[in-house]
Amino acid sequence: MYANNFDRTIERLITVPHLLIRQLMLSLLITALPVMAVDYRLVTGDAKRTRYFYVDHDSVIRKGSTVRVWEIQSFLEPDKYGVQSARFETEYDCSERRARTLASSMHKGTMADGEIDMPTTASIDQRWSSIPPNTISEVMWRYVCINF
């Protein structure tokens, strides 16, 4: 196949750097791919300090008086079904003091981590609901509407 050792040496000199450049380019491409950014910030906890409520600041979309955002409820201990957190996409109407859930999922781990126990997007009632005073829903509505 090779006429002499010189040909073999030349092929190695060309092939090895070529492979290294390919690996370097692939590594750069992978690190340049967009990363799903999340910036969950604690908003409030319940009175018993067993549930905490977070908002993803990077997911906020405001259109007029409505704000759409992803939220997490994280529980200190799993419930009887093993669920330790829930993730919701919620839309708030800041002018009408109402909200609706657009998507949700229940997770076995904290902060919507771990196995998804129950995706419930298809069964959600997406109608608007008024926000009762002195509730965690009111705290979340105020937070989202004031900050965004």
Image (cartoon, helix red, strand yellow):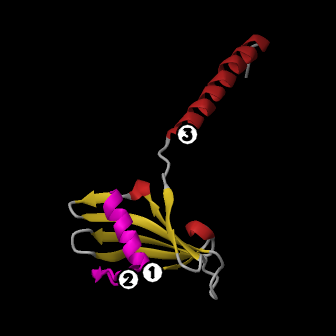
Q: Is residue 136 above or below residue 37?
A: below
Task: Verify whether residue 135 appears in magenta.
Answer: yes
Name the spot of residue 78 as percent of width and height, x first: 64, 80
Crowding at dot 2, Cα within 10 Å, few <14 / some 14-19 / many 20+, comes out as few
- Whichever of callouts 3 and 2 sits on the residue coming sooner in the sequence is 3
Circles 1 and 2 in contact, beta carbons < 8 Å: yes
In the image shown, does 72 or 142 lie closer to the viewer?
A: 142
For the C terminus, which image quadrant? bottom left
Amino acid carrying label 1: it is: Thr
Residue 70 to residue 107: above or below: above
Disc 3, SS: helix
Residue at 40% x, 70% y is 140
Queried whether the magenta region covers residue 81, the answer comes back as no
Query: Tag 3: Cα neighbours inside 10 Å, few (<14), some, or many (≥20)?
Result: few
Is there a contact, CB below 8 Å, between mark 1 and mark 3? no
Position in image of residue 4 (x %, y %) = 77, 13
Who's the residue at 61% across and 26% down the image? 21
Q: Is residue 82 above or below residue 148?
A: below
Distance of label 3 from label 2 (alpha carbons): 37 Å
- CA separation in Å, label 1 and label 3: 33 Å
In the displayed image of the protein, which residue is found farthest to the bottom? Answer: 80
Give the amino acid at mark 3.
Answer: Thr
Kindly identify the residue that appears in the image at 41 percent across and 80 percent down.
Answer: 135
Looking at the image, which is closer to me, 86 or 2? Answer: 86
Q: Which residue is mark 3?
A: 31
Locate residue 96, reporting x and y percent.
Answer: 22, 74
Dot in front, 3 or 2: 2
Mark 1 or mark 3: name the one nearer the start of the chain: 3
**Residue denoted by label 2:** 124
Residue 120 shows which numbered tag?
Answer: 1
